[in-house]
Image: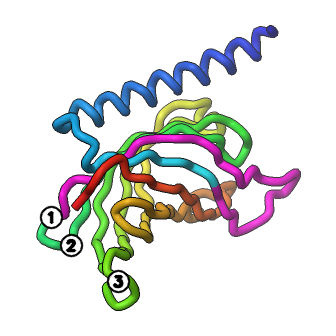
Amino acid sequence: MTKINAIKSSLFWQQCVALLLAMLFLLASQAVTADGYSLILNGKSIHKEEPKKDSFNEKNWGFGLQYDYKIYQGHWQPYLTTSIFKDSFEENSFYAGGGVMRRFTLNKIHPSLNFDAGLVGFVMSRKDHNNRRPFLGVLPAFSFGTDKVALNISYVPKVEPKLIPLWFIQLKISFGNVN
């Protein structure tokens, strides 16, 4: 294994350990029950523009964990989240953070269907940003589905000249009964 491959492998395992530590923090922050916890499966990004060369990876496979607190005042869903995934350049990216969403129930369509909209704040590590130095961010976030299964969607706007806006989609599968 070349020195570069060894470094890449080492960074991957460091990020996996960081993800596992963040997940343990999430688990330790609450009573240990399945309620409120969900598996996050990262899977898709939809870029709003084409890159100047090559193409973007739009299959952002990865996994994570989300903890949804009890609904606050009937409408507000606070949560914590952490995940690792392959980014648009086929590199491992890691984030941990939390947010709050306003829940809208869609009773007229289906009694257990919800649409949530809000913000997620996070600390993230990416190869293409300051050589993996963590940075802070806040993004608009949405969720559509039920308490058991939902699609989480974040929008990344163009906040710097070289950044391409995109939609980032995850599948959220609950471990237990929530709300």
Determine contact: label 3, label 2, CB under 8 Å.
Answer: no
Q: Earlier in the sequence, mark 1 or mark 3?
A: 1
Above or below 162: residue 127: above
Which amino acid, by three-letter code, is at mark 3? Answer: Leu
Horizontal side, residue 127 vs residue 104: left or right: right
Camera-near label (3 vs 2) is: 3
Q: Which residue is mark 2?
A: 75
Identify the disc placed on residue 106.
Answer: 3
Q: Quadrant of the C terminus?
A: bottom left
Query: Magenta stretch containing residue 137, yes or no?
Result: no
Q: Quadrant of the N terminus?
A: top right
Position in image of residue 150 (x %, y %): 45, 63
Which amino acid, by three-letter code, is at mark 1? Answer: Tyr
Query: Magenta stretch containing residue 52, yes or no?
Result: yes
Camera-near label (1 vs 3) is: 3
Which amino acid, by three-letter code, is at mark 2? Answer: His
Position in image of residue 57 (x %, y %): 75, 50
Position in image of residue 62 (x %, y %): 58, 41
Q: Quadrant of residue 20?
A: top left
Identify the disc placed on residue 72.
Answer: 1
Say which element carries label 3: loop
User: What residue lies at 62% left-to-right and 15% top-to-bottom?
Assistant: 10
- Who is closer to the viewer here, 140 or 176? 176
The stretch of residues the image draws in magenta is: 44-71
Disc 2 crowd, CA 10 A, few/some/many (<14, 14-19, 20+) = few
User: What residue lies at 65% left-to-right and 39% top-to-bottom?
Assistant: 128
Above or below 81: residue 107: below
Marks 1 and 2, how far apart at CA = 6 Å
User: What residue lies at 65% left-to-right and 58% top-to-bottom?
Assistant: 45
Position in image of residue 3 (x %, y %): 76, 9
Determine contact: label 1, label 2, CB under 8 Å.
Answer: yes
